[in-house]
Amino acid sequence: MNKDYFFCGVGGSGMLPLAMIVQAQGNRIAGSDRALDQGRTPDKFDWLRAHGVALHPQDGSGVTSPDQIVVATGAVEDTVPDIGAAKRVGATIKTRPQLLSELFNAAPTSIGVAGTSGKSTITGMVAWILDQAGRQPTVVNGAVMKNFADADHPFASALVGGPDLFVAEVDESDGSIARYDPTVAVVSNISLDHKSMEELRDLFGGFVGRATTAVLNLDNPETAALAQTLPTGKAVTFALGEEEADLSAHDLAPLPTGMSFELRLRGEPPRPVVLNVPGAHNVANALAALGAVKALGVSIEDAVAALETFAGIRRRLEVVGTQSGVTVIDDFAHNPDKIAATLKTLHAFDGRLLILF
């Protein structure tokens, strides 16, 4: 390896994990960030320096050689000085989705997690199950996975594992989902968010078509319709309370810290499952994760045991603290489906709700 990468916006939630994975493969990492220039989040940049990342002002001064690979977000403009400098010196320019999909497709086995909502949580669940099963996955998520966050890894939106198994949250909003060729394609749901329904059907249909196994949600009309188009044996389906699905959840009950339900798996006796994350939407996310790891041969017993210690994703119904009998919860929900799922979950608890958006 030993290539020189320069990440434009290296402190970003999508860039930082990717930089760490590229570095773990033996490459040199440098980068710039507007937040660094503005003096924001100094702890994050101290952490990056301590982990061998050379930081530069975002003025183009860090891009000096045609041998550098300059990585920018999908929405890259020539007005960014680093990009202007890259063009002047003849450096290779790649978008983040381009680089991530190249790493993903290079792995012999891969799980791509897509859908309008639930992606980060499902990716985190899959990562934790595979990690606990000793499979050493390399993971790129769009949010911090609390199970992997510690003093040395405060920004655990990535997990640096082995080269043979790659798990990634895959985004349809910029169309980059078309670049991924997964072994297992997970689609949680499809609803209007960033693109027209026609475009979405085309993108998700292609994603699922390129996979060996597709894990699809029968509770969502669009993913259920997608399951109908696939050859026998290719789709693994999941649903809440739906006997027709390969994996289904029944008798859902809210707990003070999560959910309990009965898991039914085609051809196996029912088994009880307890999650430490709340809401029916997280039960659906758990079914999606179980379907994905089952496709890679992880036993359901091991997978369920790991799920019971899954700590969640930062800013997904995250309890910030309790004071004077008031619990403060931080949540990232930002489109109608996600907000509806959050509200439905909160209404399962006793007490008055004060909601700020």
Image (cartoon, grey):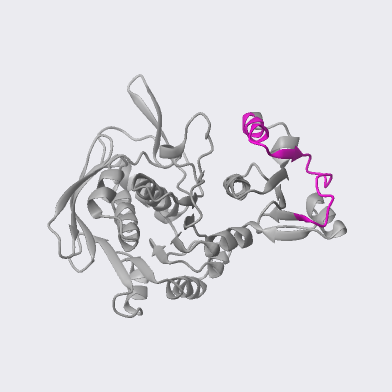
Looking at this rendering, what residue extends furthest in the top direction? 324
> Is residue 163 at all visible to an observer of this figure?
yes
- The residue at the point 37 percent across, 69 percent down is 214
Which segment did they paint magenta? 43-68
From the viewer's side, name the closer residue of 100 and 177: 100
In-image side of 99 versus 254 (left or right): right
Q: Quadrant of the N terminus?
A: bottom right
Q: Nearer the viewer, residue 113 or 225?
A: 113
Residue appearing at x 45%, y 47% in the figure? 333
Q: Per the image, is 230 magenta?
A: no
- Residue 45, image x and y in percent? 66, 34
Residue at the far right in the pictured view: 88
- Choose top left, top right, bottom left or bottom right for residue 234: bottom left
How many numbered marks appear? 0
Q: Position of residue 74 (x, y in %)?
A: 65, 59
Name the spot of residue 230 as percent of width and height, x first: 35, 78
Q: Left of 227 or right of it: where is 35? A: right
Where residue 296 sits, quadrant-wise, is bottom left
Q: Is residue 126 above or below residue 177?
A: above
Image x and y of residue 49, in percent: 68, 34
From the viewer's perspective, tell me whether residue 87 is left or right of residue 176: right
In the rendered image, residue 47 lying in the magenta stretch gets the answer yes
Please say whether residue 194 is visible from this viewpoint: no
* Residue at the image position 71 percent from the left and 57 percent from the top: 76
